[in-house]
Image (cartoon, rainbow, N blue to C red):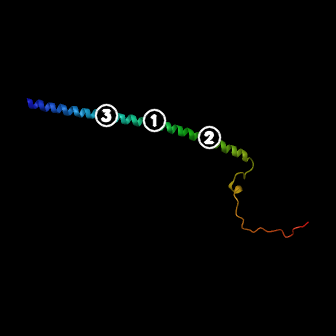
């Protein structure tokens, strides 16, 4: 009978150890989940603010584009790269043949 009681006591201790271990694992898992949820909320808030900034910048760009197109009006060559850039001139400058002197 004493042997059975000792075996039962050992089994009870092992069960209590496994329950304590399970409770600790559960606590760690719960803490990990809550930490991840907090990080997720922060990332979502950041994402929302970045999206808002992006929309504002795009509206600003559209407004600038509209303003520039209004400035351009009927002048189709306004702000084209060909107007602003200069092509190299390979020809030599020529002087007029007849220069009147006073």
- Between the residue at mark 2 and the residue at mark 1, the CA separation in whole angstroms equals 27 Å
Residue extending farthest left = 1
Q: Secondary structure at mark 3?
A: helix
Q: Quadrant of the N terminus?
A: top left
Give above or below for 58 relative to 24: below
Near mark 3 (Cα within 10 A), the count class, few <14, some 14-19 or many ≥20, is few
Q: Earlier in the sequence, mark 2 or mark 1?
A: 1
Asked if the residue under mark 1 is in contact with the one under mark 2, i.e. CB atoms within 8 Å, the reply is no
Residue extending farthest front = 102
Q: Secondary structure at mark 2?
A: helix
Residue 2 in the image: x percent, y percent? Answer: 8, 30
Residue 27 in the image: x percent, y percent? Answer: 32, 33
Where is mark 2, residue-wise? 59
Where is mark 1, residue-wise? 41
Where is mark 3, residue-wise? 26
Q: Earlier in the sequence, mark 1 or mark 3?
A: 3
Residue 43 in the image: x percent, y percent? Answer: 47, 38
Left or right, 33 with respect to 64, comes to left
């Amino acid at each position: 009978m004493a042997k059975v009681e000792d075996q039962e006591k050992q089994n009870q201790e092992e069960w209590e150890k496994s329950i304590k271990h399970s409770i600790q694992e559960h606590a760690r898992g719960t803490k990990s989940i809550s930490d991840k949820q907090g990080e997720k909320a922060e990332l979502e808030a950041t994402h929302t603010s970045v999206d808002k900034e992006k929309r504002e910048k795009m509206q600003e760009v559209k407004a600038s584009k509209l303003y520039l197109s209004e400035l351009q009006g009927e002048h189709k060559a306004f702000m084209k790269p060909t107007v602003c850039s200069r092509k190299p001139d390979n020809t030599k400058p020529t002087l007029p043949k007849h220069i009147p002197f006073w």
